[in-house]
Image (cartoon, rainbow, N blue to C red):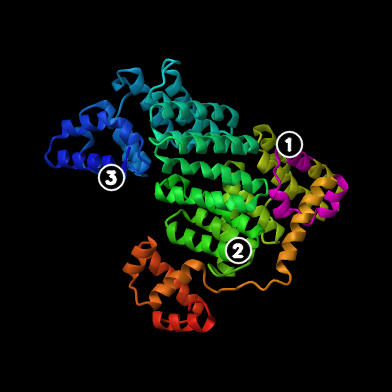
C-alpha cells in the first residue's frame, strides 16, 4: 500500500467519523482490512476509531479489529478491557473465531502461559488446513510467536515460514517481512547461520527485482543477517547490515523491535575497537528510547560500561545501583527472564562487579540450552564456564567445556564469543584445537597491532554531537537543527545538555568557543 493511499484512507476515515456516519466508517475499515494489515504504523487509524464508544461499533469483526489495533499501539487497557466484553458465542464463523482466539492468546496475562499457547494453537486448528486467508496467516504468525516464547524454535520456524508465504501471496509486504524475519531469527537461535545468510540474500535479491513490492519493509531482513555476521566474526559486514536494520526499524516505527539492534552493534564496535561509534550508538539510543522500561535502559547502560569502563552516561554509584537491580531481576525471573540479563551479569562477573551466578545455575542452564538447541547461547555459556573453572584450577572441567564450545564453532561457524570472552582461555584452547586457537589468537593479535603506533583522532564529542554543535555555531535554532537532522526538538536539547556537560560550560556560546579550542569543530 503506497503512502498516498494511506493518507487517503486516514482522510476518508476521519471524514466519516466527523459526519457521524459510523456504520459506513466501519464498513470501510472491514473492506480495507488488508490495507490496514500492511501498515507498519496503524496509530492514525486507531486514533480515529478509539474516539468511538466500543458499544457503538456495529459488528463483531470491527470490534476485534479495534481491539487488535489497540494492542498493536500499546493501549493495553483498552485492548484487554474491551476484549473482555466480547463473548465466544458472538463469533459466528470460523474466521472470526480464529481472530478472536489469536487476540486472546496475545492478551492473556503471562501467568497463564499454557493457556496462551493453547489459544494460539486453537486459532490455527479452527480453520480448514487448506485455508490461506489473512486470518490463517495471522493465526500461524501468532502461534509461531507463542511457540518461540516457549523456546520451541523448530516448530515456530515452520509456522513463521507458512505465515510468510501466505502474507506474501496476499501482497502484504509488511506482515510478510515480519513473519520471515521471525523465521530467520529462530534459525539464528538454532545456530543455522549459513541458512539464514543464504535465505536472507535470496529474498533481498528477489524483492529487489519486484517493482510492485514495498522494498522499505524488507530491510528488516538485515537484522538476522547482521546478527549472523556478528556471530561469525564478520564484524564490518555485521555493522553495515545492523545499521540498515536499525534505520528500517526507525523508519517503519516497529516499536516492538526497538532496542534489538543496539547490543549487537555495541559489541561489534567494541571488538573493532571503535569506541566513538559505541558512544554514538549509546547517545542515540538514550535519546530515542528514554521512555523504555528502566530494566532495558539499564541493560544498555551497564553493557556499555562493562565494555568500556566509560562513565560518560552515568557514574559508578549509579552503575552499582543498576547492577543490584539487575541482580534482583535475575533472582526474580532466573531463566524465565531475558537471556540478555544473564549474559550481562556474566560479563559483570568477569570484571568482578557481580557474583550472583553460580556454577550449579550455569550447569542447569546449559542443560536447558542444549535441549532447546540454542547454539549461540550454548557456546557463550560454555566459554564463560570454562573461564570460571580455569580460575578455580579445575582444568579438566574447563577443557570439557572448551571442547564442546569448539564443536559448536566447527558445526556452525560461530566464533564471536571466543573473540569477546576467549582471551583468558587461549593457552587452554591451544591444547584442544590448533585451528580455532589460531583463528582467535590472530583476531586478538590484529586487534592489539591496530592499537600500536597508530595515533587515532580522539574526540570528546560523538559525531552526532559535533554535527549539532557545528549547526549551533552557524546560529541555527533547535527547531532548525531538528529539521535538518530529522530529530525532535527534545532530542536536540538532550544532545545539547550532553555537549555542555562534556565541555564543562554553561551555554551554547561557551560550548562553541570551547569546542573550537579543542578542535572538536572548525
Residue 248 horizontal side relative to residue 82, left or right:
right
Disc 1 on helix, strand or loop? helix
Badge 2: how crowded within 10 Å, few (<14), some, or many (20+)?
A: some
Which numbered circle lies on residue 411? 1
Magenta extent: 404-432
Q: Which disc is residue 242 wearing? A: none
Q: Position of residue 105 (x, y in %)?
A: 43, 31
Q: Which label lies toward us, 2 or 1?
A: 1
- Distance from disc 3 to disc 1, alpha carbons, whole Å, reads 48 Å
In the image, taking residue 162 as reference, residue 194 lies left or right, namely right
Q: Please tell me whether residue 412 belongs to the stretch shown in magenta.
A: yes
In the rendered view, does 510 fall on the left or right side of 62?
right
- Residue 265 appears in which quarter of the rendering? bottom right
- Using the rendered view, name the quadrant where residue 175 is placed: top left
Relative to 431, residue 61 above or below? above
Question: Taken as a whole, is the magenta stretch helix, strand or loop?
Answer: helix
The answer for how far apart the CA atoms under marks 3 and 2 are is 39 Å
Of 388 and 256, nearer the camera is 256
**Residue underneath mark 2:** 305
Q: Residue drawn at (42%, 47%), measured in percent from left and top? A: 255
Q: Is residue 23 left or right of residue 496?
A: left
Of marks 3 and 1, the one in the foreground = 1
Look at the numbered discs 3 and 2 and tell me whether their residues touch, using CB distance below 8 Å: no
Callout 2–callout 1 Cβ contact below 8 Å = no
Q: Residue at x 11, y 40 (%)?
A: 19
| Quarter occupied by the N terminus | top left
Q: Earlier in the sequence, mark 3 or mark 2?
A: 3
Q: Position of residue 461 (x, y in %)?
A: 52, 72
Residue found at x 66% / y 42%: 376
How far across and down, in percent of the image, does residue 466 sit? 47, 72
Identify the residue under disc 3. 44
Amino acid at each position: 500500500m503506497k503512502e498516498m493511499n494511506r493518507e487517503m484512507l486516514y482522510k476518508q476515515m476521519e471524514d466519516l467519523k466527523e459526519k457521524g456516519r459510523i456504520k459506513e466508517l466501519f464498513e470501510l475499515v472491514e473492506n480495507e482490512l488488508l490495507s490496514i494489515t500492511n501498515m507498519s504504523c496503524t496509530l492514525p487509524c486507531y486514533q480515529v476509531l478509539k474516539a468511538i464508544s466500543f458499544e457503538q461499533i456495529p459488528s463483531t469483526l470491527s470490534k476485534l479489529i479495534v481491539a487488535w489495533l489497540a494492542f498493536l499501539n500499546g493501549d493495553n487497557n483498552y485492548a484487554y478491557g474491551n476484549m473482555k466484553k466480547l463473548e465466544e458465542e458472538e463469533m459466528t464463523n470460523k474466521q472470526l473465531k480464529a481472530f478472536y482466539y489469536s487476540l486472546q492468546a496475545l492478551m492473556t496475562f503471562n501467568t497463564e502461559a499454557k493457556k496462551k499457547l493453547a489459544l494460539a494453537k486453537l486459532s490455527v486448528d479452527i480453520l480448514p488446513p487448506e485455508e490461506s486467508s489473512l486470518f490463517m496467516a495471522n493465526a500461524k504468525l501468532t502461534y509461531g510467536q507463542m511457540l518461540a516464547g516457549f523456546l520451541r524454535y523448530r516448530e515456530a520456524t515452520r509456522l513463521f515460514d507458512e505465515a510468510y508465504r501466505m502474507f506474501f501471496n496476499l501482497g502484504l509486504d509488511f506482515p510478510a517481512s515480519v513473519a520471515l524475519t521471525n523465521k530467520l531469527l529462530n534459525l539464528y537461535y538454532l545456530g543455522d547461520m549459513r541458512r539464514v545468510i543464504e535465505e536472507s540474500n535470496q529474498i533481498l535479491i528477489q524483492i529487489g527485482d519486484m517493482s510492485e513490492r514495498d522494498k522499505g519493509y524488507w530491510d528488516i531482513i538485515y537484522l538476522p543477517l547482521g546478527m549472523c555476521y556478528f556471530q561469525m566474526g564478520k564484524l564490518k559486514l555485521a555493522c553495515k547490515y545492523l545499521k540498515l536494520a536499525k534505520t528500517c526499524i526507525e523508519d517503519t516505527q516497529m516499536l516492538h523491535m526497538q532496542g534489538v539492534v543496539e547490543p549487537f552493534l555495541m559489541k561489534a564496535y567494541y571488538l573493532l575497537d571503535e569506541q566513538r561509534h559505541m558512544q554514538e550508538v549509546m547517545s542515540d539510543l538514550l535519546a530515542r528510547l528514554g521512555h523504555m522500561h528502566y530494566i532495558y535502559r539499564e541493560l544498555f547502560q551497564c553493557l556499555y560500561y562493562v565494555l568500556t569502563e566509560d562513565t560518560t552516561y552515568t557514574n559508578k554509584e549509579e552503575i552499582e545501583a543498576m547492577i543490584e537491580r539487575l541482580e534482583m531481576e535475575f533472582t526474580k525471573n532466573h531463566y524465565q527472564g531475558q537471556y540478555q540479563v544473564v549474559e550481562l551479569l556474566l560479563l559483570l562477573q568477569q570484571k568482578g562487579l557481580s557474583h550472583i551466578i553460580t556454577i550449579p545455575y550455569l550447569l542447569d542452564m546449559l542443560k536447558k540450552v542444549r535441549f532447546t538447541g540454542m547454539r549461540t547461547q550454548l557456546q557463550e555459556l560454555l566459554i564463560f564456564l570454562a573461564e570460571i573453572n580455569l580460575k578455580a584450577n579445575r582444568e579438566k572441567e574447563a577443557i570439557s567445556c572448551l571442547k564442546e564450545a569448539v564443536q559448536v564453532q566447527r558445526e556452525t561457524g560461530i566464533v564471536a564469543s571466543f573473540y569477546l570472552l576467549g582471551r583468558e582461555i587461549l593457552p587452554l584452547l591451544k591444547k584442544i584445537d590448533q585451528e580455532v586457537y589460531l583463528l582467535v589468537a590472530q583476531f586478538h593479535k590484529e586487534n592489539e597491532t591496530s592499537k600500536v603506533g597508530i595515533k587515532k583522532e580522539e574526540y570528546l564529542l560523538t559525531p552526532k554531537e559535533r554535527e549539532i554543535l557545528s549547526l549551533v555555531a552557524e546560529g541555527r535554532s533547535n527547531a532548525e537543527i531538528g529539521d535538518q537532522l530529522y530529530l525532535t526538538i527534545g532530542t536536540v536539547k538532550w544532545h545539547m545538555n550532553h555537549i555542555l556537560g562534556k565541555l564543562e560550560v554553561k551555554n551554547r556560546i561557551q560550548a562553541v568557543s570551547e569546542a573550537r579550542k579543542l578542535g572538536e569543530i572548525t
